[in-house]
Amino acid sequence: MKASQFFISTLKEAPADAEVVSHQLMMRAGMIKRIGAGIYNYMPMGLRVIRKVEAIIREEMNRAGAVELLMPIVQPAELWQETGRFDKMGPELLRVKDRHGRDFIIQPTSEEVMTDIARQELRSYKQLPKNFYHIQTKFRDERRPRFGVMRGREFTMKDAYSFDRDVATATLSYQNMYAAYQRIFDRFGLQFRAVAADTGAIGGEISHEFQVIADTGEDAIVYCPTSDYAANIELAEGVALLAERAAATQDLTLAPTPGKSTCEDVAALLGLPLSQTVKSIVLASDELDKDGAIVKSTVWLLLLRGDHELNEVKAGKIEGLKGGFRFATHTEIEDHFGCKPGYLGPIKLLKPVKVVADRTVALMSDFVCGANQMDCHFTGANWGRDLAEPDLVADIRNVVVGDPSPDGKGVLAIQRGIEVGHVFLLGTKYSKDMNATFLDENGKPQHMVMGCYGIGVTRILGAAIEQNHDARGIIWPDALAPFSVVICPIGMDRSEEVKAAAHKLYDELRDLGVDVLLDDRGERPGAMFADWELIGVPQRVVLSDRGLKEGQVEVQGRRDAEASKLALADVLAHLKGKLKL
């Protein structure tokens, strides 16, 4: 491609609404143009990167035995009503009506449509296993779209769905996709981690996220540097930090703590470590009648060490809270504890509550907790003596740096990541809701066991830039760059020698199948170099009249601090080595 034939539109400054580096650089490099909140045109330069991403995904999905098809963006509501997600998904699901008043949705994902295909087409165990995928536009009506392609409303994803006869074969399909994802992200040239994750709104039994490592990532990734353990913060297991409960050494004492309503302030006032305090979090769960009215509420008291934070995902897996929970109202709190928040604790309650203690709290002794009395806390509190044993002991906290790894092979570290892929072993959640069955060897109907596997195609661009950039612009991994080589001839309009050498090298690289661009725009060297450093082309070749007279050409990798001077005859071999041709 020649620059004069292509479309290049760079900016010196990013728009004011571009918040993160990837958004700023994609706008400046002319890769995207905003037309609405969270909605972008993908310009020619950005589209070339998207096509590179899609090509790698297709090659590896096909290699893994998946079969490509294409499902519609607009889907009938009836399918989503079968699974209940038409109502459950909330305002993120864009609902529309056609001219006849029939309900449709703009797809954020395609489990229902794919399950509908499977129940019609896969009738026998002989047709299983099967894995279908597509690469398609999605829409999620984000309340606050931001960060450019990182959290837009319209985006492109690769979805794949596997169908198996039982959990054993479905697990093999899951492992096959997991391995394919490892190959895909390796080929992208990105630093990433695969971490155990919560199944979230999609549901299922096993789940892993593929996270691109970046300081600006929204997700916290927990891992052990000395083992293979890795998990999303929502799922990372918090082991008990005490081996056993020590015997009580203090009497229960009511301590005045005027105006000190946080564990941090109480610990400072009493001259005790924060780890000796226990914080109280009061939740409520509701039982509803068929009309959605509350018929009964249960109040829960969750206890964590003062320096720990509640993990709401873990709390939501407690029996009794699985159906949903909320924070208790002030009226409920005063009715059960006889006190306002800030001084709450598990001792001397007015009414019984369900007490859940984190694993570490359940082993604490002589601890400090709220006294259910304004401006007062108890010191020297002990299980069994001063209060009953908890109704339940569970892992309900976020892990912190330095916690023991659950696999016993070291301590935990935490880094930021950007989720770009997710694999789920769904089980029969959707096949049961939609009655997707096959006939087994005995002619009996069985529900298909499903897996779901997604990659955020357009999000990959933002994640790659967040991980790979400098003050001058984007630094694309070789596999994703819009062009692999840019030839920058200086004064080509004034020197036939420069023009001939530039075109010869351009033709040679094209013949090798290299994505090469010849910048024939006639720009000044400084402006030309700035454009390609901003856009992030991996290899730049500079030809000048003076250099050719000296028998030299300048070649510089985007990550290199300085250019290398090579003989013109050696440039092609040098680039072939750099591009691994």
Image (cartoon, rainbow, N blue to C red):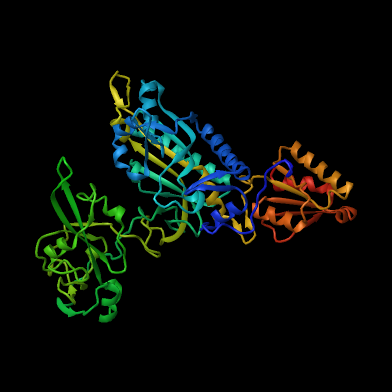
Q: Considering the image in quadrants, where does the N terminus appear?
A: top right
> Total label count?
0
- Quarter of the rendering occupied by the C terminus: top right
> Residue lying farthest left?
350
Q: Nearer the viewer, residue 504 or 82?
A: 82
Q: Is residue 425 visible?
A: yes
Which residue is nearer to you in this view: 21 or 16?
16
Residue 361 lies in quadrant: bottom left
Q: Residue at x 62, y 54 (%)?
A: 475
What percent of the width, then of the height, locates residue 542? Answer: 78, 53
Q: Position of residue 65 (x, y in %)?
A: 50, 30
Determine the residue located farthest toward the right in the rendered image: 549
121 w.r.t. 365: above or below? above
Residue 360 on image: x %, y %: 27, 64
Answer with left or right where residue 418 lies relative to residue 581.
Answer: left
| Nearest to the observer: residue 10 or residue 222 | 10
Give the residue drawn at x 27%, y 51%. 316
Q: In the shown orientation, is residue 300 left or right of residue 199? A: left
Q: Residue at x 41, y 62 (%)?
A: 411
Any part of residue 428 in sight: no
Q: Horizontally, is 283 left or right of 212 in the view? A: left
Residue sitting farthest toward the top: 443
Name the foreground residue: 231 vs 93: 93
Left or right? Give the position of 556 relative to 402.
right
Q: Dividing the picture into quarters, in which one does residue 386 lie?
A: bottom left
* Quadrant of the rendered image containing residue 353: bottom left
Across and down, in percent, residue 571 comes to 79, 48
The residue sitting at 53% across, 50% down in the picture is: 462
Question: In the picture shown, does residue 415 fall above or below 378?
Answer: above
